[in-house]
Image (spheres, rainbow, N blue to C red):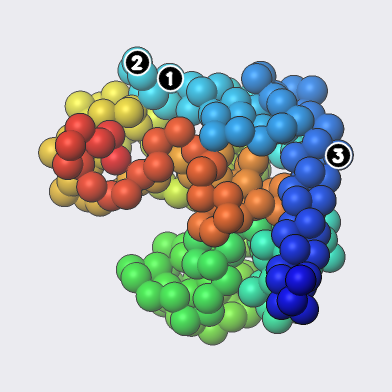
Amino acid sequence: MTFQRTVLQLAACSAIAYAQSANIGLGTNPDAQGASEEVTPGAGPNGSEDWLNSGMEADGWTAPYLSWDSLVKIDRKTFYANAGSACEQYDWAFQQAGDEHQIDPVFLAFIAMQESSCDADAGGPTPGLMQVACENYPDGQCTNDVAKSVDAGASFLRKQLDDNNNNAIKVIGNYNGWFTAGDQTGLNGGRGLSLDYPCSDDGKAYGQPQNLDYLQQTLNGWFLGLNPYGDENWLGQYHCSGSCDSGNVC
């Protein structure tokens, strides 16, 4: 057996042991419907994806309630040692913004990975680590500045928590632009986000939100130290590609 093969096998064993601790050792959220210790494409400790996405098959997303304080998650040290290693260099910013807005900094790291893979130079209409709308910056101007980007993301997150009675599902969905009939966007015939929205005329025209796996990837992925963009790319039931070809819903 070569040294290289030995190293690879040891790494594989370490990865398996870590995945098992993330999937099983953290227990389940007692407030989450369909919660399971084992993370699967459609479930995990913070609830089943069908439950998280409740209402999308009917008259639009209805956002069931799940307390932010009850969420099953790993700590920053564990996150940085595994799936969130790219975020460790920005821990100072997460800590600073977390203290300012009374949010556990690990949540900011989770969201930064989901939004930008912790790339401070990530582009798009909402650039930077947190990929948050420009209106959330103090001067209304988007920037790649790390401290300002993280503070803007934390500010938006705090507002969502306050406005939605700490409902983690509504808060995380809103971060990705999910909307309900009550938000009165007028999109999707006024129904709010549904399975058929991404490939509807409105969905194609506005381009977001396209990722119907967002809640599953975040709450049962990054929050547990699993990487939906890497080894755990099976997370989620829709595997949205942004394409509406061949009957895809997103």
Q: Residue at x 36, y 19 (%)?
A: 57
Front residue of 232/216: it is 232
| Mark 1 and mark 3: Cα distance apart in space | 31 Å
For marks 2 and 3, the one nearer the N-term is 3
Where does the image place residue 48, in percent across and percent down from the top left? 60, 26
Q: Amino acid at mark 2?
A: Ala
Q: Residue at x 51, y 43 (%)?
A: 234
Q: Residue at x 80, y 65 (%)?
A: 10
Q: Amino acid at mark 3?
A: Gly
Front residue of 145/19: it is 19
Which one is closest to the eye, mark 1 or mark 3? 3
The crowding category of the residue bearing disc 1, from other C-alpha atoms within 10 Å (few below 14, some 14 to 19, many at least 20), is some
Q: Which residue is mark 1?
A: 55
| Side of 55 relative to 106 (left or right) | left
The crowding category of the residue bearing disc 3, from other C-alpha atoms within 10 Å (few below 14, some 14 to 19, many at least 20), is few
* Above or below for 127 versus 217: below
Q: Residues at badges 2 and 1 in contact (C-beta under 8 Å)?
A: yes
Q: Residue at x 40, y 42 (%)?
A: 239
For marks 1 and 3, the one nearer the N-term is 3
The disc placed on residue 197 is none
* Above or below for 48 versus 167: above
| Quarter of the view holding residue 235 | top right
| Mark 2 and mark 1: Cα distance apart in space | 5 Å
Q: Amino acid at mark 1?
A: Gly
Q: Which residue is mark 3?
A: 25
Which one is closest to the eye, mark 2 or mark 3? 3
